[in-house]
Amino acid sequence: MADQPQNHARHVAIIMDGNGRWAKKRHLPRALGHREGGEAVRRTVKACEKLGVECLTLYAFSSENWKRDEEEIGDLMLLMRRFIEANLDDMVKQGVKLKIIGDYKAFAPDIVEKLEYALAKTAGGVRTLAVALNYGSQQEIARAAAKAAEHGAITPETIAANLDTADLPPLDLLIRTSGEVRLSNFLLWQAAYAEMIFMDVLWPDFGEEHLQAALDEFAKRERRYGGR
Ligand code: FPP
């Protein structure tokens, strides 16, 4: 991982879309699509280590996902509990530090407790897995602006310093799977100069080869940050 070239992405974020369609294609319940989505998360976290991505941010549950039916929300919550239980030891072994963005305290008390336990257990990690939970970017920006206003002027710098992502490296690359081309209230501020890649693969099928392809595409792009 030492000496990555200039055009290497340090911080990659993914909108993990297509679990439902993956299940539908196989005449399976949506819950199984989400479960396979959890497997894709495991693979992708491993792939980040191998491919030298320092920080991975995943959109796991948006503030708008509460609109889904109760059964699906229940399935996602169960998956979250199981995911933490099944993966915490591996995360510690792999040197992954968990971070949560969004208002996770709105989840059930046992999930909040599990998440906080996982945050404490992984605090010594050297690479970051940031998971967006009950996250909405407009809400995050509004919260950050309000906090900035408490201490003085509202400027791009003071807003950025109060975002949930303030301690993460700048976002380099934003990937969305499943062929949809929109940001869905994810990292709107942070994506100002990020490269975006929309891939046709459904999230449960995502793996190292897709991440590699996205990083290769990123490396070819010329980033000018508004300059020439
Ligand atoms: C989008 O697919 C996916 C989600 C709303 C949930 C993402 C969650 C996971 C991948 C589960 C595991 C994650 C963790 C961190 C435990 P969709 O249901 O919108 O798919 P569709 O558009 O095809 O219906």
Image (cartoon, grey):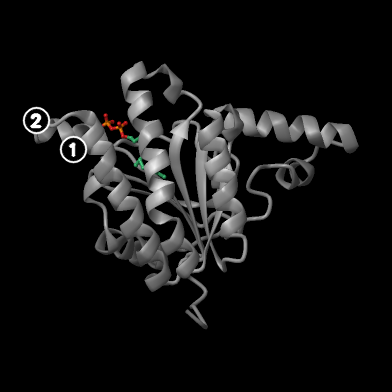
Position of residue 15 measured from the top left corner of the image (x, y, whole percent): 39, 42
Give the residue at mark 1: 22
Q: Is residue 196 left or right of residue 111?
A: left
Q: Amino acid at mark 2?
A: His
Which quadrant of the figure contains the C terminus? bottom right
Position of residue 162 measured from the top left corner of the image (x, y, whole percent): 74, 42
Q: Amino acid at mark 1?
A: Trp
Residue 210 appears in the rendering: yes
Number of numbered discs present?
2
Q: What residue is at 25 percent from the left and 32 percent from the top?
A: 31
Q: Residue at the right extreme?
A: 152
Q: Residues within 10 Å of mark 1 (few under 14, many from 20)?
A: many
Relative to 178, say whether 149 is above or below: above
Relative to 82, say whether 11 is above or below: below
Q: Assess mark 1: CB under 8 A from ligand 1?
A: yes
Position of residue 151 measured from the top left corner of the image (x, y, whole percent): 89, 37
- Residue mark closest to the camera, 1 vs 2: 2
Spatial CA distance of label 1 from label 2 is 9 Å
Give the residue at mark 2: 27
Q: Is residue 13 left or right of residue 50?
A: right
Q: What residue is at 35 percent from the left and 38 percent from the top?
A: 79
Which quadrant holds residue 43?
bottom left
Position of residue 39 measured from the top left corner of the image (x, y, whole percent): 28, 51
Q: Secondary structure at mark 1?
A: helix
Relative to 172, say whether 30 is above or below: above
